[in-house]
Amino acid sequence: MDSMITAAGRALAAGDPLGALKRVALRDDPPALALRGIAMAQLGDLVRAKVLLRRAARAFGPREAVARARCVVAEAEVALASRDLGWPAKVLDAARATLEEHGDGANAAQARYLEVRRLLLMGRLDEAERRLARLDPAPFPPVLKAIHELVVAGIAMRRLRTKAARAALTRAEQAARQARIPALMAEVESAVLALNAPAARLIASGEERVLRLEEVEAVMTSAAFVVDACRHVVRAAGTVVSLATRPVLFALARALGEAWPGDVARDTLIARAFGSKLTDESHRARLRVEVGRLRRLLRTLAGVNATKRGFALTPRRARHVVVLAPPVEGEDAAVLAFLADGESWSSSALALALGASQRTVQRALDSLAAAGKVQWVGRARARRWMTSPVPGFTTTLLLPAPALFD
């Protein structure tokens, strides 16, 4: 390898893409194409980066399997940055195996981290944790140690283990400083800001206040009866009742929780649960049926008692009832939560991450665009959606995750 390629590689490792381009910008040999692709990725031109990396992979000869595998790993990183979650995982796995076979442990580890980060974005936390447990960051360079700790922190934040998340971010900050890569230090700083930002609203006894993730964790583990509007569950005394697939019952539970210790009028419950402004006897009959269903589901945690004007919630063991509400609400809040990371997403990637149909996601995006909350660039299949982060809030609790503390 010639001196210019070596110098460009060192510049990229130090987070200096412009310094790398000065050395290889006019060259079209495979190593130079690969380095140019990585440089363009660091500069944010992900489309051009992908083209250059594919050209480099095709240009490397049959005996240069390691070089081709490194190009595949770099392209997978570009795909992750551009939120192309449908990128073929088998191709990355084959490249990782080639790198391990030839002793390139650092790039093989990078391939594993890319897959773990992809799983984290999709909310598949159990699988991400299992794969992360197989990786020991001790022998890796500082940049990979920082990435490892960022993934640890991301999983911990999604599981509301804030002490573990804070400790991991401290280690990530130390590793990023050792790596001396500005973009990596900025990513760590962004994660710290998300951990410290308000994450939810607590509604109790008619009053409302914002909570950070640490305070949310304290509420979840307290002795209170919690109506969790972030995960659509009800929890008390270590028992969790999921109402994620029962929107009418959850609407009733939330209305009763917000009014506690008072009751809620029947007309109000009908409007909250059924979306009807006008009520008749059929609505009241349906309300009685739905309240009966809610009463059966919550029988071990609370009673739902009739009053003169409506119904009231009576917890059996908890002394307090609180409602945990997300910082932003609405039908499209989950889509907005993904876009709040400041990256550009395709509708197909959002559908994959949310576990919804692409048509459903597209309708949500159109609605958000009409409201001026998101914007798009590109056309047809190349269209990407983005928005600025929600000011002052973290949308961690709106992202898909398994039920907490169940």
Image (cartoon, helix red, strand yellow):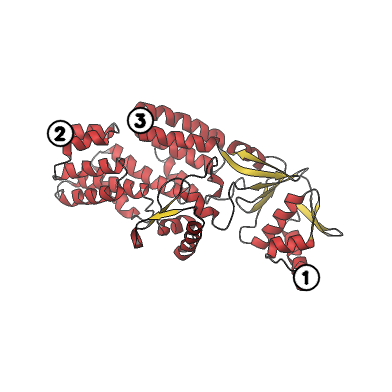
Question: Looking at numbered disc 2 in the image, what kind of residue is underneath it?
Answer: Met
Q: Is residue 70 left or right of residue 191?
A: left
Q: In the rendered image, which residue does mark 2 sit on? A: 4
Q: Nearer the viewer, mark 3 or mark 1?
A: 1
* Residue 269 at least partly seen: yes
- Point out residue 405 in the picture as x, y percentages from the top left corner: 61, 45
Residue placed at 63% from the left, 37% from the top? 215
Residue drawn 77% across the image and 71% down it: 280
Q: Please rate how many residues cluster around mark 1, counting C-alpha atoms within 10 Å: few if below 14, some from 14 to 19, many from 20.
A: few
Q: Earlier along the polypeptide chain: callout 3 or callout 2?
A: 2
Q: Give the residue type at disc 3.
A: Pro
Q: Read off the residue under disc 1.
A: 285
Q: Is residue 301 visible?
A: no
**Residue behind mark 3:** 142
Task: Point out residue 53 in the picture as x, y percentages from the top left corner.
Answer: 23, 48
* Separation of marks 3 and 2 at Cα, in angstroms: 24 Å
Q: Quadrant of the N terminus?
A: top left
Spatial separation of the CA atoms under disc 3 and disc 1? 64 Å
Q: Are marks 3 and 1 in contact (CB under 8 Å)?
A: no
As drawn, the residue found furthest toward the right would be: 308
**204 relative position to 142: left or right:** right
Left-right relation of 7 to 313? left
At label 1, the amino acid type is Ala
**Neighbour class for label 3 at 10 Å: few (<14), some, many (≥20)?**
many
